[in-house]
Image (cartoon, rainbow, N blue to C red):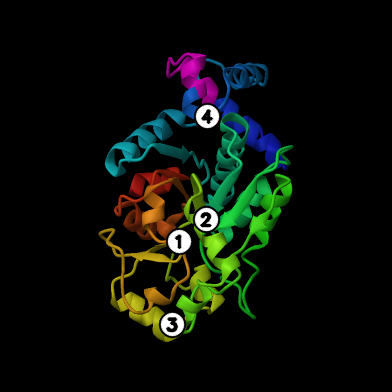
Amino acid sequence: MQSDDPKASDEIFISKKCAWLYYVGRLNQNQIAKKVGLSKMRVHRLIAFAEKKGFVKTFVEGGFDETSKYENILKEKYHLKISEVIPIEDLNNDPNEMIGAAGARFIMNQINENNISEFGIGTGNTVNTIAKWLPKINKKVDFITVNGSLTSHNSIQTETGINQIAYKTNGECYNVGIPLMVESIDQKKVLEKIKFIKEIMNRAKNTKIKILGVGGLFDTSQIVKSKIFSKDSIEKLKKAGAVGEVAGNFFDKNGKYISIKETQKITSADIDSFKISTTVLVAGGKQKFSQIKSVLKSGLFTGLITDEETAKYL
């Protein structure tokens, strides 16, 4: 059963997963509630919904036995606390829509179940997709960007998604308001002393939950397309071994943080701030296989929401 309504499609997906965990995984409703981040009553209703819609027969439609296996493998291999793998039945489809839907559901659960009132958040396509799938929530929740802007005169407005998310949660969106890469280290020092910039960056650093995408230096990445980074800077980063990127922080293929002159001009929460919070990566797709693997190897991140094909690669 398919629906053009993102909320309806998301309801179908999570109901199938709850039904699989209940009937095949042999978990009780309390255990399922804890695993998927919902209340026991919500889980009960979702299982009933799956039964009513005919998803429960002698088996549950969908490959959740496989995805649950990969979730456990990723947790063990990369020492993650949170791992969600989205089954993609048609490999020709772009997985980012369903990954974004899962990211939206994670945010919604944290707000409704754990009363989280602010999030640190990155910029880019992943955030825009999350914004599309997030339903209107009748609570005030603020979103604080953890890095500088990728917006330039010839790039997409990457902060649009953050503003939409804040609107849907009746909250405020706090943008740092300076480019992701500035002209010099001295300029960065001056900008970061400005009171409102300093306050936003400190607040972003101390958020309990951060939702971040994964990028890199491939031709279609937001960093390359935005032209905020010069061709010379990109070449220097590549020469230093940069593969994956999270909120302006670059990592080599072994997960080592790249520290060169170019990275010292980047405006972002420092990597130590990832360690003091629940930092969840929302990313997937063949184009990002090596980038996601490189950042996971750093050991800095708490969770990953991704698709089944990416999970197999990792």
Question: Residue beneath label 4, please?
Answer: 37
| For discs 2 and 4, the disc positioned in front in the rendered view | 2
Q: Which mark is residue 204?
A: 2
Of pointers 2 and 4, the one earlier in the residue sequence = 4
CB within 8 Å, label 2 to label 4 = no
Q: What distance separates the C-alpha of mark 2 from that of mark 3?
A: 22 Å
CB within 8 Å, label 4 to label 3 = no
Q: Is residue 168 above or below residue 144?
A: above
Question: Residue beneath label 1, please?
Answer: 269
Q: What distance separates the C-alpha of mark 2 from that of mark 4?
A: 24 Å
Q: Is residue 217 left or right of residue 100?
A: left
The dominant secondary structure in magenta is: helix
Locate the N terminus by quadrant. Answer: top right
Of pointers 4 and 3, the one earlier in the residue sequence = 4
Residue 60, percent across and down? 52, 22
CB within 8 Å, label 3 to label 1 = no
Quarter residue 16 falls in? top right
Magenta highlight range: 17-33
Q: Nearer the viewer, residue 69 or 59?
A: 69
Q: Which amino acid lies under the numbered mark 2 shown in the image of this protein?
A: Ala
Q: Is residue 213 above or below residue 177?
A: above
Q: Nearer the viewer, residue 254 or 90?
A: 254
Magenta region includes residue 29: yes
CB within 8 Å, label 1 to label 2 = yes
Question: Residue beneath label 3, please?
Answer: 186
